[in-house]
Amino acid sequence: MISASMKNVSKSFGTNKVLKDVTFETREGEIFGMLGPSGAGKTTIINILTGQLSVDSGECYVSVGNNEIGLMLEHDGLFNRLSCLDNLIVFEDIYGIPRARTLEALERVGLTDAKKTIVDKLSKGMRQRLVLARAILHKPKILFLDEPTSALDPMTARGIHALIQELRDTGSTVFLTTHNMEEATHLCDRIVMLHQGAIIEEGPPKDICQRHDSIKTVMDLESVFVKLTGGGLA
């Protein structure tokens, strides 16, 4: 079953055409990755699918309502003067979520001991985990994660990876953007490669590598991207 899709979508900001005839679909219960360098159009696609931007042309579809979508975006939107728990209580009240589930979300991201810590005192990794807790608080059916492990240390990133896989295994669809080849290879059931606003390749990571005669290592997707575009993902 399709969870989200785009068909022939184009989007411009002034004279800058950031998406060019983009077509893809995500399936229920998978981790779908969008791989590309900064500026390729990944965040614009998430903003369109979540109703924050309109398209110039084409069609987009999301199978659930806004209250069934979870978001972890570049700008975290946390309340810096509130504690971790109080940040989640704001959304607990909005969604009518019981306190037990809020505490469970903090536990799942490893922030139980920091629940009374003021957000302004958190490390970058702890902030990322709190944003993820907020995103999963209402048990969304589709979770949009925009580079969720960017600038995190390897141990924190592995913890977030494990939680993302757990969410997929319990039925959520995860839409993940990244420019990290290892992350995409390790996590994603399928990916699309985005370059200058256009999709240049798609499919399971191993299948993409095989189509381009690459050896199956974590650097394969980088090699394919260079082959297709003449440039890397950084």
Image (cartoon, rainbow, N blue to C red):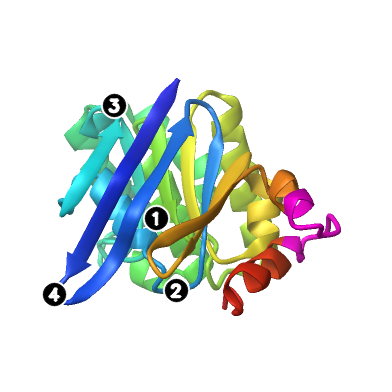
Magenta: predominant secondary structure element? loop
**Residue 171 x, y percent position in the rendering:** 52, 23
Say whether disc 4 or disc 3 marks the residue closer to the N-terminus. 4
Crowd band around label 4 with a 10 angstrom C-alpha radius: few (<14), some (14–19), many (20+): few
Q: In this view, does 107 lie to the left or right of 59?
A: right
Whether 218 is among the magenta residues is yes
Which one is nearer the viewer's eye here, 218 or 84? 218
Q: Which amino acid does the dot numbered 3 rest on? A: Val
Q: What are the residue bounds of the magenta stretch? A: 209-220
CA gap between label 1 and label 3 equals: 33 Å
Q: Which amino acid does the dot numbered 4 rest on? A: Gly
Q: Which amino acid does the dot numbered 2 rest on? A: Ser
Question: Mark 4 highlights which residue?
Answer: 14
Q: Is residue 128 left or right of residue 4?
A: right
Question: Mark 1 highlights which residue?
Answer: 116
Q: Which amino acid does the dot numbered 1 rest on? A: Lys
- Label 4–label 1 contact, CB within 8 A: no
Question: Mark 3 highlights which residue?
Answer: 64
